Every structure is written in structure tokens, then in C-alpha cells.
Image: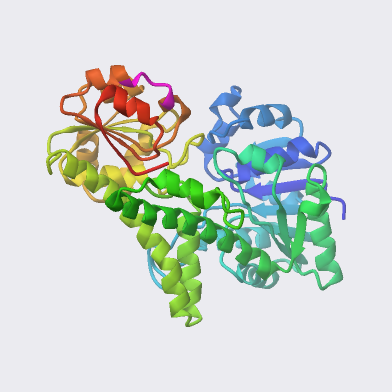
Amino acid sequence: MNIKNICCIGAGYVGGPTMAVIAQKCPEINVTVVDINEERIKAWNDENVENIPIYEPGLPEVVKEARGRNLFFSTDVDAAIDKADMIFISVNTPTKTYGIGKGMAADLKFIELCARQIARVAKDDKIVVEKSTLPVRTAEALKNILDNTGNGVNYQILSNPEFLAEGTAVDDLMNPDRVLIGGDIDTAKGKEAVDALVDVYAHWVPRERLLTTNVWSSELSKLTANAFLAQRVSSINAMSELCEKTGADVNEVSKAVGMDSRIGAKFLKSSVGFGGSCFQKDILNLVYISKSFGLHEVADYWEQVIIMNDHQKRRFAAKIVQTLFNTVSGKKIALLGWAFKKDTNDTRESAAIYVADYLLNEQAEIVVYDPKVKTEQIYADLDYLNTRSLEENRARVTVVDGAYEATKDAHAVAVLTEWDEFKELDWQKIYKEMLKPAFLFDGRRLLERKTKEGIGFEFYAIGS
């Protein structure tokens, strides 16, 4: 099957970068990314590619090369669906906040809306690709909707989960460890659809890295991969607390463990806790699925990863309060970093949100600086918690444009995102301009030990 037109529904952190790279690598294929958010599409079409809505190193260059040639961004969803041979669904699948499965199951309302819109519009055969992170058997639900509410069109449903790490998404797309494609490989039509997507990726990905499976294996592999990675983070964080009690150095423990070839060094850096859109959501989804099959011990095992992660965030914030003589009321706490990790402007489930919330509950005055996260996003994250009024959040949280401005006259500084620029700061200058006694809390252990000794402030590190 020769794919000439691709449509992607959803212009977010997955859909935008993925489609940009496909367009760049496949100049003969027209790629249209659609979204009902007019402001987001307007930003993707901004003449200055540095203003695109997703901050990702290398992405502006890719967009600049392909946009207007064979990469297009539009709010006309129906037109893009009608024209496409292959449709990617890359919309948000947050954890449910209501009803059955509240707090654990994935909310599939946006997926269902996409399926119904495709069924309503499509007049010829389509390949529909799940790109969003979805629970097992979602493809079956998609197919039921498409087959029973549409115009008699034949659909092939593929699962193509993303394994991108924000901050390195472009490189992950250009040089993936593997690309997983699940489909109905036991039928001729299903195999043809799988081969069509394989041919798209084969423009730049070696064939041996293109893995084909049945749909269910593909869907579950994504959840399992994220669960395993998150488990490693929570495991080393649990050890970091034990290290603090015993006098061991968690970095030395991490290095020793990571040199074991059976384990490896990745995701063995202790921190204030993992964030982002995938880990917590996918583990909770796995917990819910396990419980729905009566596998309560399995569910309890994976849920403990989340419990440990939440504990680490509370522990870090509590350490700040404890060190500042058990009160932060009226004290200025500077937070350096708000994104959940460096090289992204994504703040979903960022540890900084929960550390700030804890300190605000203790009546602290918060000043935030992050090089890529916008002021309105920081307030939106705090407002979403619904812990206090919108007016109080704005009265007690100040967002500034630089690290030095944030730390001036602070009682404490907490480094919560490992932005490279924080490593280059003049910490002697910061210490001199902080209130005395003042403290630095590093959630990512960015600073050298000699910096601590050279400046003389107390340095409580829970982090990498």
C-alpha cells in the first residue's frame, strides 16, 4: 500500500514532533497535523519557528525544513481525515478524575471522540494508528466504533506507541532503539497495513529496529516499559532515604549498582521524584487493569512505585521546612526549575508543582524561575490542584525572568529541574545575596561537592 497522505489528530508533545520528523524524512508524503486548539495551531504556523508551542532541542530546524513543503498544521480536522490514507490519533489520555476507575484508569473520551469523527467523515478505507498511550484492548474498542457507526468503510487499526523522552525527542525519533508496530498480522489486510507503516519508518530507521507484533502486545509493551523505568527511579529514591540515615552516599551506591551489566546505569539517579505525562499515568493504568482481572498482588506491587514517588516529593518539601527551623511562614523560597525535566517546557506531574504546593500550605512565599515554562502555565498548574484560591496563588507565588532575581534575598533555594544553565550560575554571588542563615536544596544534585565546601552553606541533596 502506497501512503501519500497522513493526518495526525493532536498537535501536542507527541504528534507535533513525530509528524515533523516523518515529513522531513518522507518528502513524498503530505503530512497534516490537526488540532481544535486554534492558538496551538497558530503557534505551530508562526513565521518564527522558535515560537512553536513545544520546546524540544532540534525541533525548530526540522519544522522549518518541512513546513509548507509537505508538513501542514490546520484546525480543519474533517478535511484532513477525508484526504488521509493513514490517520494517527495522538490526543491526550489523562487519568480519570470521575466515575469507575477514578484516579487510575485512562480517560478515553478524547480517543472515542476521534473515532466517531473519523467514522462520520471517512468515505474510503483508512489505516488508523494509535499513537497515544492507551490501555490494552483500546484498539478493539476503536474498531467497534469505526465499524458500527461509520459509512461502511474498512478500517485497519494499528498500535504504534511512542517511546520518546522529552528533551531528546528529536534524537529519539531520528535514532530510535526500536519502533513498535502492532496490527492484525494474521490477516492479509492487517499485514498490508502493518507493512505500510513499516515502509514509512523504513525511510530512515533500519529494518532490524522495526518490530511488528499483534496489537495487544504492542499496547501492553508501552505500559510495561514506562512501569519498569519508573520502578527504577522509585527504587533508587527509596535507597536515597536509607543512605541519608546510614551515612552512605547514594551517588556512590548508584554508580556501584549501575556498573553491573545486568542492571545498567540508566534511570538510577535519585531525584525529588519522577514527573511527566507518562510514568504515573501508565502505572496507574497498569494498576487498574491488574485489579480489573483480580490480580490484587500485582496491582499492589506497581502501586507502591507511585506511593514511593509521592513520598519522595513530600519528603523533599518537608526537609526544607525542617531545616528552616520548622517554619517557612513568610519566608521566601526560590524554586529554580518548574518543568518536570530539562530541555522541555512540559510541566505535567512535575515534582516542582507538589513541592510548591506543600510549601504554600506552610505559608511560604514562593519565587519561581524556569527558562522555558511560561508564567501562565505555572499558575495553571497550581490552580489545577484546587488547594487554594486563584487569587492566593497569584499573591503568594511570583514568577521572574532570571535565576539571580529569584534567589536574591531568599531564605532557601531549591533546584528542581536540572537545566544546564543552573550549573553555570555564580553560586558565590547567589549565596552572598541570599538571607543568612540560608540554605540550598538540590533536587537533582547539580553542584559539585567542592562548591558546597567553598561557599559554606548547608546542602541537603535529594537528587541526581
Residue 312: x and y in percent read 33, 52
Whether residue 90 is visible, yes or no, is: yes
Q: Quadrant of residue 180?
A: bottom right
Residue 338: x and y in percent read 38, 37
Farthest residue, direction bottom: 294
Please say if 120 is above or below 8. below
Nearer to me, 275 or 378: 275
Image quarter where the N terminus lies is: bottom right
Q: In this picture, which residue range is highlighted in magenta? A: 423-427
> What's the coloring here?
rainbow
Q: Residue at x 77, y 69 (%)?
A: 184
Please say if 75 is above or below 180. above
Q: Residue at x 57, y 25 (%)?
A: 50
125 on left or right of 73? right
363 on left or right of 152? left
Nearer to me, 368 or 23: 368
Nearer to me, 104 or 445: 445
Please say if 262 is above or below 32. below
Residue 374: x and y in percent read 40, 32
Q: Residue at x 18, y 43 (%)?
A: 321
Whether residue 104 is visible, yes or no, is: no
Q: Is-magenta flag for residue 429?
A: no
Total numbered labels placed on residues in the image: 0
347 on left or right of 326? right
Q: Quadrant of residue 181?
A: bottom right
User: Magenta stretch mostly in which secondary structure?
Assistant: loop
65 on left or right of 198? left
Image quarter where the C terminus lies is: top left
Residue 142: x and y in percent read 64, 67
